[in-house]
Amino acid sequence: MTDTASSNQSAPPLPPLPQLLTGQTALITGANSGIGEAVALAMGQAGANVAINYVAGDDAAQAVADKIAALGVKAKIYKADVSDETQVQAMFAAAIADFSTVDILVANAGLQRDAAFTSMTLAQWNTVLSVNLTGQFLCAREAVKEFLRRGVVASVSRSAGKIICMSSVHQQIPWGGHVNYATSKGGIKLMMESLAQELAPQRIRVNAIGPGAIRTPINTSAWDTQDAYDKLMTLVPYGRIGEPEDIGHVAAWLASDHADYVVGATLFVDGGMTLYPGFATNG
Ligand code: NAD
Protein backbone atom coordinates (compact mmCIF):
# COMPACT_ATOMS: atom_id res chain seq x y z
CA MET A 1 0.00 0.00 0.00
CA THR A 2 1.32 3.46 -0.88
CA ASP A 3 1.90 6.36 1.52
CA THR A 4 -1.03 8.08 -0.23
CA ALA A 5 -3.34 5.29 0.77
CA SER A 6 -2.30 5.00 4.39
CA SER A 7 -2.15 8.75 5.03
CA ASN A 8 -5.30 9.76 3.15
CA GLN A 9 -3.43 12.38 1.11
CA SER A 10 -4.80 13.44 -2.28
CA ALA A 11 -3.29 11.44 -5.13
CA PRO A 12 -0.86 13.45 -7.32
CA PRO A 13 -2.39 15.11 -10.42
CA LEU A 14 -2.86 12.97 -13.51
CA PRO A 15 -0.84 13.74 -16.66
CA PRO A 16 -2.30 16.55 -18.84
CA LEU A 17 -5.14 15.55 -21.15
CA PRO A 18 -4.54 15.70 -24.91
CA GLN A 19 -6.85 17.87 -27.06
CA LEU A 20 -9.41 15.13 -27.66
CA LEU A 21 -12.52 17.32 -27.93
CA THR A 22 -11.56 20.44 -29.87
CA GLY A 23 -14.54 22.13 -31.46
CA GLN A 24 -17.15 20.31 -29.36
CA THR A 25 -19.46 21.58 -26.63
CA ALA A 26 -20.10 19.59 -23.47
CA LEU A 27 -22.98 20.22 -21.07
CA ILE A 28 -22.29 18.90 -17.57
CA THR A 29 -25.01 18.78 -14.92
CA GLY A 30 -24.21 19.39 -11.26
CA ALA A 31 -20.91 20.89 -12.37
CA ASN A 32 -20.19 23.33 -9.56
CA SER A 33 -18.99 20.66 -7.14
CA GLY A 34 -17.14 17.37 -6.86
CA ILE A 35 -17.15 15.02 -9.83
CA GLY A 36 -19.16 17.34 -12.09
CA GLU A 37 -16.67 20.14 -11.57
CA ALA A 38 -13.76 17.82 -12.37
CA VAL A 39 -15.55 16.52 -15.48
CA ALA A 40 -16.20 20.09 -16.63
CA LEU A 41 -12.53 20.99 -16.12
CA ALA A 42 -11.37 17.86 -17.93
CA MET A 43 -13.64 18.59 -20.89
CA GLY A 44 -12.20 22.11 -21.05
CA GLN A 45 -8.64 20.77 -20.82
CA ALA A 46 -9.46 18.42 -23.68
CA GLY A 47 -10.47 21.43 -25.78
CA ALA A 48 -14.27 21.44 -25.48
CA ASN A 49 -16.42 24.46 -24.72
CA VAL A 50 -18.34 23.80 -21.53
CA ALA A 51 -21.89 24.53 -20.38
CA ILE A 52 -21.92 24.30 -16.60
CA ASN A 53 -25.24 23.38 -15.01
CA TYR A 54 -25.88 24.02 -11.33
CA VAL A 55 -28.92 24.34 -9.11
CA ALA A 56 -27.53 26.41 -6.22
CA GLY A 57 -24.26 28.25 -5.64
CA ASP A 58 -23.85 30.89 -8.35
CA ASP A 59 -20.35 31.84 -7.15
CA ALA A 60 -19.04 28.27 -7.19
CA ALA A 61 -20.46 27.78 -10.69
CA GLN A 62 -18.90 31.01 -11.97
CA ALA A 63 -15.56 30.04 -10.40
CA VAL A 64 -15.62 26.77 -12.39
CA ALA A 65 -16.48 28.72 -15.55
CA ASP A 66 -13.60 31.13 -14.93
CA LYS A 67 -11.13 28.27 -14.46
CA ILE A 68 -12.28 26.67 -17.72
CA ALA A 69 -12.27 29.95 -19.67
CA ALA A 70 -8.64 30.44 -18.54
CA LEU A 71 -7.83 27.31 -20.55
CA GLY A 72 -8.79 29.18 -23.73
CA VAL A 73 -12.22 27.62 -24.40
CA LYS A 74 -15.68 29.06 -23.83
CA ALA A 75 -17.54 28.34 -20.58
CA LYS A 76 -20.92 29.52 -19.36
CA ILE A 77 -23.14 28.75 -16.38
CA TYR A 78 -26.79 27.63 -16.52
CA LYS A 79 -28.95 27.48 -13.41
CA ALA A 80 -31.56 24.72 -13.64
CA ASP A 81 -33.03 21.98 -11.48
CA VAL A 82 -32.49 18.83 -13.55
CA SER A 83 -35.68 17.28 -12.18
CA ASP A 84 -37.81 20.11 -13.61
CA GLU A 85 -38.82 19.56 -17.24
CA THR A 86 -39.36 23.24 -18.04
CA GLN A 87 -36.05 24.30 -16.54
CA VAL A 88 -34.15 21.54 -18.36
CA GLN A 89 -35.72 22.51 -21.68
CA ALA A 90 -34.90 26.17 -21.10
CA MET A 91 -31.29 25.30 -20.20
CA PHE A 92 -30.76 23.30 -23.40
CA ALA A 93 -32.36 26.02 -25.50
CA ALA A 94 -30.07 28.62 -23.95
CA ALA A 95 -26.92 26.51 -24.28
CA ILE A 96 -27.70 25.66 -27.90
CA ALA A 97 -28.30 29.35 -28.62
CA ASP A 98 -25.00 30.28 -26.94
CA PHE A 99 -22.76 27.54 -28.35
CA SER A 100 -24.75 26.75 -31.56
CA THR A 101 -25.03 23.08 -30.52
CA VAL A 102 -24.29 20.57 -27.78
CA ASP A 103 -22.16 17.52 -28.67
CA ILE A 104 -21.71 15.89 -25.26
CA LEU A 105 -23.99 15.53 -22.24
CA VAL A 106 -22.63 14.33 -18.93
CA ALA A 107 -25.71 13.69 -16.78
CA ASN A 108 -23.95 13.90 -13.45
CA ALA A 109 -26.18 15.73 -10.96
CA GLY A 110 -27.11 13.53 -8.06
CA LEU A 111 -27.79 13.43 -4.36
CA GLN A 112 -28.41 11.11 -1.44
CA ARG A 113 -31.18 11.12 1.18
CA ASP A 114 -30.18 8.19 3.33
CA ALA A 115 -32.39 6.38 5.81
CA ALA A 116 -33.06 2.93 7.20
CA PHE A 117 -35.81 1.47 5.06
CA THR A 118 -38.72 1.69 7.50
CA SER A 119 -37.80 5.30 8.34
CA MET A 120 -37.43 6.36 4.72
CA THR A 121 -40.01 8.99 3.86
CA LEU A 122 -41.77 9.25 0.54
CA ALA A 123 -40.13 12.64 0.15
CA GLN A 124 -36.66 11.08 0.54
CA TRP A 125 -37.53 8.40 -1.99
CA ASN A 126 -39.05 10.84 -4.49
CA THR A 127 -36.25 13.42 -4.22
CA VAL A 128 -33.54 10.88 -5.01
CA LEU A 129 -35.46 9.27 -7.87
CA SER A 130 -36.45 12.67 -9.31
CA VAL A 131 -32.96 14.12 -9.39
CA ASN A 132 -30.82 11.03 -10.00
CA LEU A 133 -33.01 9.16 -12.48
CA THR A 134 -35.72 11.45 -13.88
CA GLY A 135 -33.14 14.25 -14.13
CA GLN A 136 -30.97 12.08 -16.37
CA PHE A 137 -34.00 11.15 -18.50
CA LEU A 138 -35.00 14.80 -18.98
CA CYS A 139 -31.47 15.94 -19.87
CA ALA A 140 -30.80 12.97 -22.14
CA ARG A 141 -34.06 13.58 -24.01
CA GLU A 142 -33.16 17.20 -24.78
CA ALA A 143 -29.62 16.23 -25.77
CA VAL A 144 -30.84 13.51 -28.11
CA LYS A 145 -33.29 15.88 -29.83
CA GLU A 146 -30.36 18.20 -30.56
CA PHE A 147 -28.08 15.35 -31.70
CA LEU A 148 -30.76 14.11 -34.12
CA ARG A 149 -31.42 17.64 -35.44
CA ARG A 150 -27.72 18.21 -36.16
CA GLY A 151 -26.58 14.70 -37.14
CA VAL A 152 -22.95 13.77 -37.67
CA VAL A 153 -20.54 16.55 -38.55
CA ALA A 154 -17.53 14.52 -39.65
CA SER A 155 -15.04 17.30 -39.08
CA VAL A 156 -16.07 17.44 -35.41
CA SER A 157 -16.76 13.84 -34.37
CA ARG A 158 -17.57 10.43 -35.81
CA SER A 159 -20.82 10.32 -33.85
CA ALA A 160 -23.86 12.56 -33.74
CA GLY A 161 -23.51 12.96 -30.00
CA LYS A 162 -22.36 11.36 -26.79
CA ILE A 163 -24.17 10.90 -23.49
CA ILE A 164 -22.39 9.82 -20.33
CA CYS A 165 -24.64 8.90 -17.42
CA MET A 166 -22.97 9.24 -14.03
CA SER A 167 -23.99 6.05 -12.32
CA SER A 168 -22.24 4.36 -9.40
CA VAL A 169 -20.84 1.06 -8.24
CA HIS A 170 -24.27 0.89 -6.58
CA GLN A 171 -25.92 0.07 -9.89
CA GLN A 172 -24.37 -3.32 -9.13
CA ILE A 173 -23.57 -3.46 -5.40
CA PRO A 174 -26.70 -3.42 -3.22
CA TRP A 175 -26.54 -0.73 -0.51
CA GLY A 176 -28.60 -1.11 2.67
CA GLY A 177 -29.60 2.17 4.23
CA HIS A 178 -29.52 3.76 0.78
CA VAL A 179 -32.31 1.89 -1.01
CA ASN A 180 -33.51 5.01 -2.84
CA TYR A 181 -30.01 5.81 -4.11
CA ALA A 182 -29.18 2.26 -5.22
CA THR A 183 -32.56 2.03 -6.95
CA SER A 184 -31.84 5.25 -8.85
CA LYS A 185 -28.46 3.94 -10.01
CA GLY A 186 -29.88 0.54 -10.98
CA GLY A 187 -32.46 2.46 -13.01
CA ILE A 188 -29.74 4.46 -14.70
CA LYS A 189 -28.06 1.23 -15.81
CA LEU A 190 -31.04 -0.01 -17.81
CA MET A 191 -32.06 3.45 -18.96
CA MET A 192 -28.55 3.93 -20.34
CA GLU A 193 -28.40 0.49 -21.98
CA SER A 194 -31.88 0.82 -23.51
CA LEU A 195 -31.06 4.28 -24.81
CA ALA A 196 -27.76 3.05 -26.20
CA GLN A 197 -29.52 0.24 -28.02
CA GLU A 198 -32.25 2.54 -29.39
CA LEU A 199 -29.93 5.34 -30.50
CA ALA A 200 -26.82 3.58 -31.77
CA PRO A 201 -28.26 3.35 -35.31
CA GLN A 202 -28.44 7.16 -35.29
CA ARG A 203 -24.74 7.22 -34.35
CA ILE A 204 -25.41 8.43 -30.82
CA ARG A 205 -23.22 6.82 -28.19
CA VAL A 206 -24.68 6.39 -24.71
CA ASN A 207 -22.49 5.04 -21.92
CA ALA A 208 -22.11 5.30 -18.16
CA ILE A 209 -19.35 5.75 -15.64
CA GLY A 210 -19.69 3.92 -12.34
CA PRO A 211 -17.51 5.72 -9.80
CA GLY A 212 -16.43 3.93 -6.66
CA ALA A 213 -15.51 6.01 -3.60
CA ILE A 214 -14.47 9.46 -4.81
CA ARG A 215 -13.37 12.27 -2.51
CA THR A 216 -16.31 14.71 -2.84
CA PRO A 217 -18.84 16.41 -0.55
CA ILE A 218 -21.48 13.71 -1.18
CA ASN A 219 -19.60 11.14 0.93
CA THR A 220 -17.42 13.15 3.30
CA SER A 221 -18.13 10.87 6.25
CA ALA A 222 -16.57 7.95 4.34
CA TRP A 223 -13.12 9.58 4.18
CA ASP A 224 -12.79 12.60 6.47
CA THR A 225 -11.35 10.76 9.46
CA GLN A 226 -8.47 8.28 9.43
CA ASP A 227 -10.74 5.60 10.92
CA ALA A 228 -13.36 6.07 8.22
CA TYR A 229 -10.69 6.11 5.53
CA ASP A 230 -9.05 2.91 6.82
CA LYS A 231 -12.44 1.17 6.86
CA LEU A 232 -13.15 2.39 3.32
CA MET A 233 -9.83 0.99 2.15
CA THR A 234 -10.95 -2.54 3.04
CA LEU A 235 -13.36 -2.14 0.08
CA VAL A 236 -10.81 -0.75 -2.41
CA PRO A 237 -8.19 -3.19 -3.72
CA TYR A 238 -6.17 -0.39 -5.35
CA GLY A 239 -5.54 1.11 -1.92
CA ARG A 240 -6.54 4.72 -2.37
CA ILE A 241 -9.68 6.79 -2.56
CA GLY A 242 -10.58 8.14 -6.01
CA GLU A 243 -10.07 11.81 -6.77
CA PRO A 244 -12.67 13.71 -8.85
CA GLU A 245 -10.03 14.09 -11.56
CA ASP A 246 -9.93 10.28 -11.93
CA ILE A 247 -13.50 10.48 -13.20
CA GLY A 248 -12.97 13.67 -15.23
CA HIS A 249 -10.20 12.20 -17.35
CA VAL A 250 -12.14 9.01 -18.06
CA ALA A 251 -15.18 11.07 -19.07
CA ALA A 252 -13.13 13.14 -21.53
CA TRP A 253 -11.75 9.98 -23.13
CA LEU A 254 -15.17 8.27 -23.22
CA ALA A 255 -16.68 11.32 -24.94
CA SER A 256 -13.92 11.38 -27.54
CA ASP A 257 -13.60 9.51 -30.82
CA HIS A 258 -10.89 7.39 -29.16
CA ALA A 259 -13.85 5.60 -27.58
CA ASP A 260 -15.94 5.58 -30.79
CA TYR A 261 -16.80 1.87 -30.56
CA VAL A 262 -17.80 2.00 -26.88
CA VAL A 263 -21.60 1.80 -26.85
CA GLY A 264 -23.83 0.92 -23.91
CA ALA A 265 -20.98 0.22 -21.52
CA THR A 266 -20.61 1.08 -17.87
CA LEU A 267 -17.01 1.82 -17.10
CA PHE A 268 -16.41 1.27 -13.40
CA VAL A 269 -13.79 3.71 -12.16
CA ASP A 270 -13.51 2.34 -8.68
CA GLY A 271 -10.04 1.06 -7.80
CA GLY A 272 -11.48 -2.44 -8.01
CA MET A 273 -14.41 -1.97 -5.62
CA THR A 274 -16.68 -4.07 -7.85
CA LEU A 275 -14.21 -6.99 -7.75
CA TYR A 276 -15.68 -8.41 -4.51
CA PRO A 277 -12.51 -7.72 -2.47
CA GLY A 278 -13.90 -9.81 0.42
CA PHE A 279 -13.11 -12.88 -1.70
CA ALA A 280 -9.46 -11.92 -2.31
CA THR A 281 -8.27 -14.28 0.39
CA ASN A 282 -10.51 -17.22 -0.40
CA GLY A 283 -13.80 -15.72 0.84
P1 NAD B 1 -21.54 16.49 -5.07
O1 NAD B 1 -22.56 16.61 -4.00
O2 NAD B 1 -20.24 17.17 -4.90
O3 NAD B 1 -22.13 16.92 -6.47
C1 NAD B 1 -23.46 16.71 -6.85
C2 NAD B 1 -23.88 17.86 -7.72
O4 NAD B 1 -25.22 17.67 -8.16
C3 NAD B 1 -23.84 19.19 -6.97
O5 NAD B 1 -23.27 20.17 -7.81
C4 NAD B 1 -25.30 19.46 -6.70
O6 NAD B 1 -25.59 20.83 -6.56
C5 NAD B 1 -25.90 18.90 -7.98
N1 NAD B 1 -27.34 18.74 -7.90
C6 NAD B 1 -28.07 18.17 -6.91
N2 NAD B 1 -29.38 18.26 -7.19
C7 NAD B 1 -29.48 18.92 -8.39
C8 NAD B 1 -30.56 19.31 -9.19
N3 NAD B 1 -31.82 19.06 -8.82
N4 NAD B 1 -30.30 19.96 -10.35
C9 NAD B 1 -29.03 20.22 -10.73
N5 NAD B 1 -27.96 19.88 -10.00
C10 NAD B 1 -28.18 19.22 -8.83
O7 NAD B 1 -21.31 14.92 -5.23
P2 NAD B 1 -20.46 14.10 -6.33
O8 NAD B 1 -19.81 13.02 -5.59
O9 NAD B 1 -19.66 15.00 -7.16
O10 NAD B 1 -21.65 13.44 -7.17
C11 NAD B 1 -21.76 13.57 -8.58
C12 NAD B 1 -22.37 12.31 -9.15
O11 NAD B 1 -21.47 11.22 -8.95
C13 NAD B 1 -23.70 11.91 -8.51
O12 NAD B 1 -24.58 11.42 -9.51
C14 NAD B 1 -23.29 10.78 -7.58
O13 NAD B 1 -24.35 9.88 -7.35
C15 NAD B 1 -22.18 10.15 -8.40
N6 NAD B 1 -21.28 9.31 -7.61
C16 NAD B 1 -20.45 9.85 -6.68
C17 NAD B 1 -19.60 8.99 -5.96
C18 NAD B 1 -18.64 9.50 -4.92
O14 NAD B 1 -17.99 8.67 -4.26
N7 NAD B 1 -18.45 10.79 -4.75
C19 NAD B 1 -19.62 7.61 -6.20
C20 NAD B 1 -20.50 7.12 -7.16
C21 NAD B 1 -21.32 7.96 -7.87
Image: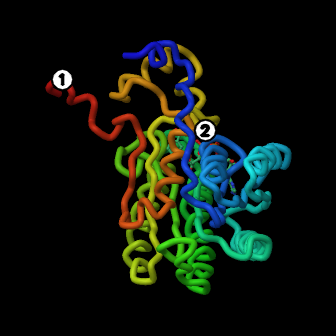
Q: Residue, x 52% and y 27% (percent of image)?
A: 222
Image quadrant containing the N terminus: top left
On the rendered structure, is 209 left or right of 64? Answer: left
Query: Residue 98: where, in percent of width, then height?
Result: 79, 71
Label 2 Cα neighbours within 10 Å, binned few <14 / some 14-19 / many ≥20 = some
Amino acid type of the residue tagged 2 in the rendering: Ile
Give the residue furthest to the right: 59
Residue under label 1, please give it.
281
Colour scheme of the rendered structure = rainbow
Amino acid type of the residue tagged 1 in the rendering: Thr
Q: Residue, x 57% and y 34% (percent of image)?
A: 219
Quote the CA–CA distance across marks 2 and 1: 31 Å
Residue under label 2, please give it.
218
Element assignment for label 1: loop
- The quadrant where residue 90 appears: bottom right
151 or 120: nearer the viewer: 151
Tag 2–tag 1 contact (CB < 8 Å): no
